[in-house]
Image: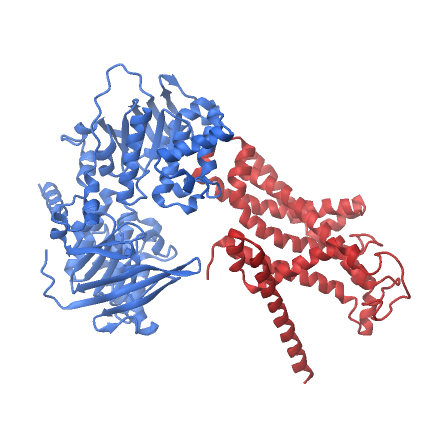
Amino acid sequence: MKDTAAKPVLLTMRDVRIDGHSEEVWSPIIKGVDLTLHKGEVLGLIGESGAGKSTLGLAAMGFVRDGCRISGGTIDFDGIDLLAASDAKKRGLRGKRIAYVAQSAAASFNPAHKLIDQYSETPVQHGVMSEQEAHRDAVELYRRMQLPNPDEIGFRYPHQVSGGQLQRAMTAMAMACRPDLIIFDEPTTALDVTTQIEVLSAIRNIVARFDTAAIYITHDLAVVAQMADRIKVLLRGNEVEEADTRTMLSAPKEDYTKSLWAVRSYARPTQPPVRKGTVPVVAVKGVTAGYGQVDILKNINFDIHKRRTVAVVGESGSGKSTAARVITGLLPPRQGQVLFNGKTLPPDYRKRNRDQLRQAQMIYQMADTALNPKLRLRELIGRPAQMYLGLNGKALNERVRALLDLIELEPDTYIDRLPSELSGGQKQRIGIARALAAEPQFIICDEVTSALDQLVAEGILKLLDRLQGEFDLAYMFITHDLATVRAIADEVVVMQNGRVVEQGPKDQMFQPPHDPYTELLLSSVPEMDPDWLTRLLEERAAKAAG
Amino acid sequence: MALLLTLLKVAIAIAIAMASGWLFRAALVAITRGETRKMLRTAPVSAGFGMLVVFVYVFVAVFAHVIAPFSEREIVGAQFLPWDSTHLLGTDNLGRDMFSRLIYAARNTVGIAFATTALAFIAGSFLGLLAATVGGWLDQVLSRVVDVLMAIPALVFALLLLTIFGTSVVKMVIVIATIDATRVFRLARSVAMNIVVMDYIEAAKLRGEGLFRLIIREILPNAMAPLVAEFGLRFCFVFLMISALSFLGLGIQPPTADWGSMVRDNASLITFGNITPLLPAGAIALLTVAVNFVVDWSLHRASGLKE
């Protein structure tokens, strides 16, 4: 870690207050936060969603989103008062001296122009370089960002490169004018762990190479531990604490920070192994399935037993969700079959009877799209109970209230709410209640925690665990997050390109020897140790060399 | 000078319209509660004015027999009498009271237009949602039939059908509703296309919900906002179409009063510089503008735009 405190101060924010406008009133988003950033220093901003991380990051450019205003404080960037500066002056700074890298590179690039032309736009606009110089410079930076074929990749369109490459191209673009400050807003959140490593190491190299100061916004503690010199924790618009990375990780002062740190240590007790000869609740036998002529799944086999959780892991495109679609009957397989308690299920859900449908329920990744926004909780949760169990009137009302109690939501307060009147974690709980309302034996959880903050996600995992014990449920847990697997799984199925590359009990899976792909996946999961990334890159380089 | 005076008059008219719109909105806010109240409070003044005008039209249409000084069809004096205290707007080409006919026409024209639009919506949106939900060959058949119907210019097609089937109010309602249902079908289908791919629809299908319940409870509530906005616009088009058909003699038949044929009957007066024949046209224009104010506001709300 560099000694950056001795360097001159680049950015000073004092008692910054930002309000957001909603429902005709101004309510505070940032409630008086101080921030100091030295030249060449990387500051990590962490906190759950709604903490004001992005708002604060944007304010460092003197920018606020529509419907927001800066209501107090000072922002001083290298002697320039950003709050007093004219729009023209701020425009002159943005892109040239302060740059911004957004979460979704795919949404931030213009799909109609080549990467290199978009790269050149900023330096040419600001009069830093001519077009030819910018092109030459782009190739140089693409090389530094470890992009494949740096000489040619710039002449592709955004849709012709992968997500991780696009994110790196975006970082290169932000570097075009060699800015003094870059704001990274969750640059790797949308990426797989294996891709994330490449982007993280590229960002870290280039920031160090040009001695650029950076604000790194993320909710992933392990990532921030690799990237930042100092960490600032935010909670609902207030600063919780700030310290340099090592101090923060080893000795957090505040309870909130400690609770954030503790999340990753949650793990439920391991279940005893299933006795030989037990009929599994769900058995997937030799399933090959796909869309059109393309096979997405190739000869998949796995069993899920009563009261057990099988985690299916793999990167995006590995066929995890397709396997779930085959089990639910949305995608009839080309070969193979799905057995339920030893009996074959009809491959198409439309051919299954009501009881077969009832027994297998699903909880979706995005609770926002999985709950009908126009129905009240009473009907959302009550409908399966009404359909499958024939409950009506008073009995139905009682059942809905009992279910709300079960997911730890107060029935009187919530029963007549719409999904839009709930937080992200509460919506996911409603998804769980809806699945439970059918009184199933088996539930598919499709990335149920990946859209949630870590503390909220932990609450959901604990709830699922408790419900499994109460109702003897079998879970199929689709995830790409190995920390979740560690916390909740009994057995693990690792998938790659539509094949199962390894499967077995959890304890065995986290012990070597591994299949090479499992090894890559496991080693790519960021750890809280600030030296983890450096060590991992050295190990991989040594392996490649030798 | 004259120009300035005209401008001044226009400015006063706009000011009065805005003030009345503001007052009407304030009155609505005072008598409503909860969600509706919150929604009304954020309504622009133009929407307030639009709601006021629509309210006045509906009031006049419902209480026409009470408000109108004379009956709809009775001949009460000489032809083309000028404005005076008994015949507020004079008499028409047959000596009927112009003011009373204007009021009765509100009932006929607005009522028929509303019935037609409602019919077009029930048929169009149900079939549109059905096509999007079921997909496959049903979608193909319905969509191609609609394409064919839409390829023929609406007014010409209506004239053709009415000439074939003859003119009566019921037939006219059915013909116009059929033509307009094709437009509603297209909208409902495209809106529903975006809804049927949502996870909650997949969840409902996996739950084993029937087709009807899927459409009514899961899809329709989410398609309501654009459909309601479209209802307002469609109402204006239907209204103008009925007036146009009546003007051409194939719409509402005499002696029933309606605004379109009233313009035609009294058109000869225009050559003498008399504005009376244009009043029904003005009534049509005012309602169309007012409905659009309300529609703009509801579209704005539906799209979630705040600025």
Q: Position of residue A139 (x, y in %)?
A: 23, 58
Residue at 38 percent of width and 39 percent of height: A410
Query: Observer-nearest residue: B118 or B50?
Result: B50
Query: Observer-nearest residue: B101 or B67?
Result: B67
Q: Where is residue B204 in the image (x, y as percent from the top left)?
A: 47, 34
Q: Which residue lies furthest to the top in this view?
A: A277
Q: Residue furthest right?
A: B78
Q: In this view, does B49 lie to the left or right of A386?
A: right
Which of the chains is blue? A
Residue at 38 percent of width and 23 percent of height: A335
What colour-coding does the image apply?
by chain
Q: Where is residue B1 in the image (x, y as percent from the top left)?
A: 67, 85
Q: In this view, does A281 lie above or below A243?
A: above
* Residue B298 showing in the rendered view: yes
Residue at 62 percent of width and 66 percent of height: B20
* Residue A152 showing in the rendered view: no
Q: In this view, does A532 lie to the left or right of B304?
A: left
Which of the chains is red? B
Q: Where is residue A359 in the image (x, y as percent from the top left)?
A: 40, 24
Query: Observer-nearest residue: A217 or B72?
Result: B72
